[in-house]
Every structure is written in C-alpha cells, then in structure tokens.
Image: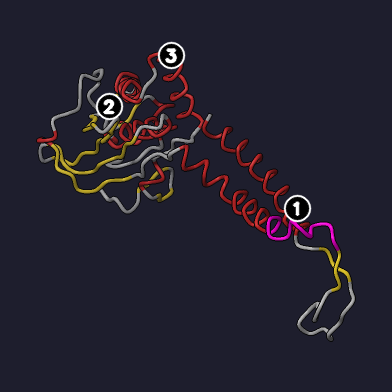
Amino acid sequence: MALDHAYVDGRYLNPADFITPEDPSVQAVAKSIVEKLGAEDNAASRLREAYNYVTLNIRYVTDIKQWGYPEVWAMPSETLKRGLGDCEDLSFLLCSVLHALGVRSRVVFGEWKGQGHAWVEAWTDGTGGILEATSGQPFTGFADPAAYAVQTTVGAEPEDPVLALLFYLAPGLAMFGIGAFLMIDDAQDAFKLEPSKGRLLPWDPKTEGIPHLHHWWLGILLVILAIVAMAVACVLWMLKYL
C-alpha cells in the first residue's frame, strides 16, 4: 500500500486529501449526528455516533470486489454514495466525520495481526484510542492496541474554532491597533493644520508652508476600516463554524 500517493478516478492524490470534513456530504452526516444527539451533545457522544454511523451504514468490501483492482482509495463522498468501502475508505470517512464534528482524530496505516490495514485513532477529553471502522458493530469501546502495529499516520487535527476566529480577526486587529496608536499619539492636535517642514518626497525640493493634516485622521480611517474588516471576518467565521 503506497502512502505517497493514491490512484482514484485516474488521478494521483496525497493521502491527506482524503480527509474532507468540509465536503457537503460529510457535513450533512455531521449535522444529522448533532441533531440526533440533541441535549446529549458532547465530544464523547459525537465520537460514538460518528463511529456507529460509519460501521452500521457502510459495508466493508475489498477493492477487488468493488473496483476490480487490488488497491483503490475512494473519497469519503464516494464511500457515502456507494455505501461500500475497505479499511482505508471507511477510515478516511470516519476521520472526516469526526473532524467535521470537532473531534481530534487521524487515520493510521500499519498492520493488524500481520496484515496491512488502516484504522482511526481519536481522542476526547484527554482519553482516546483505536476505532476499528470495519467492525460492522456499534461502539462498545476502543479496540485493543496490542493487535495493531503503526507505520504512519495521515491527517491533521481538526481546526480549533477559537484559534480560527483569531486568525480571521488578525488583519482587522492589526489595523485597529495601528489606527488607535496614531489617534492617541496625535490626539491633542487632531484638528489642527500646521506647515509642513522639509520635503514632501525624498526627491522634491525643500518646501515650507504647505499645510497638511495630522496623522490622527489616518488613524481614525484605519480604525473604521478595521471595524468593517472584523465584522466581515466574524460573518465568514460564523458561516464556516456555526
């Protein structure tokens, strides 16, 4: 099983590309899980229900039987559409759903009892373990790690919504800080005009007596633009995470 690329629909892709929490079909599954949990919604119950959805709705089948080839990796959307997949297909799907639900998880490639295999590792509230997506059974606990030998892992942790919000707000916060500094620094003379001294530009001849505005005005402009930028950032963040 080559891990540097995978052949899907005639294209070679990076394994990390198969973890697709933002895919609409994956998002739909995540939304249905949250709605099902209702008042019982928490990280542990999300993990359990994501596992149950995959193991009880997607049937394990080999690539030879499904595709006629020894090894074909399917995108989670394709696995959902077909309702079929082998170990890496089910693992990519489960990991994608978990990420969409905000649960830390990754796909692991290695061996199970000496045979090439793929599975998911997930964590909630400081505890976690192996999720065997091919079990066909509802969640009763994490699998025994003794039978698994890790070779490599694929997939980053899901985005932290709080950190993502700070990232979205960063440009606006920077503009606001600069603008506020300019305003405070020039507050006392904010509405005054004074003659300029020296050159307006390095290559201009020296001039005097040309009135110019203080940098308080530039500061207030930056603050206004910053507020608008942060408002837009909040809307974009809410559209993605809420």
Tell me which numbered mark, 3 or 1, is placed earlier along the sequence. Answer: 3
Q: Are marks 2 and 1 in contact (CB under 8 Å)?
A: no
What is the x, y in percent for residue 142?
Answer: 20, 27
Where disc 2 sits, the SS reads strand
Q: Are marks 3 and 1 in contact (CB under 8 Å)?
A: no
28 to 3, vertically: above or below: above
- In the image, taking residue 157 as reference, residue 191 lies left or right, namely right
- In the image, taking residue 200 as reference, residue 64 lies left or right, namely left
What is the x, y in percent for residue 57?
Answer: 34, 20
- Residue at 30% from the left image edge and 34% from the top image edge: 91
Of badges 2 and 3, nearer the viewer stands 3
Q: Quadrant of residue 179?
A: bottom right
Q: Which span is picked out in magenta?
A: 182-192
- Residue at 32% from the left image edge and 54% from the top image edge: 4
- In the image, taking residue 218 as reference, residue 172 lies left or right, namely left
- Under mark 3, the amino acid is Gly
- Residue at 48% from the left image edge and 28% from the top image edge: 27
Q: Which residue, given by chain and number where applicable, does mark 3 sit on? A: 38
- Mark 2 vs mark 1, CA separation in Å: 60 Å
Question: What's the mark number on residue 221?
Answer: 1
- Under mark 1, the amino acid is Leu
- Under mark 2, the amino acid is Tyr
Residue nearest the viewer, comparing 64 with 184:
184
Classed neighbour count for the residue bearing mark 3: other residues with Cα under 10 Å, few (<14), some (14–19), many (≥20): few
Q: How many marks can you see?
A: 3
Where disc 1 sits, the SS reads helix
Question: What's the mark number on residue 60?
Answer: 2
- Residue at 23% from the left image edge and 43% from the top image edge: 109
What is the x, y in percent for residue 207?
Answer: 86, 82
- Mark 3 vs mark 1, CA separation in Å: 45 Å
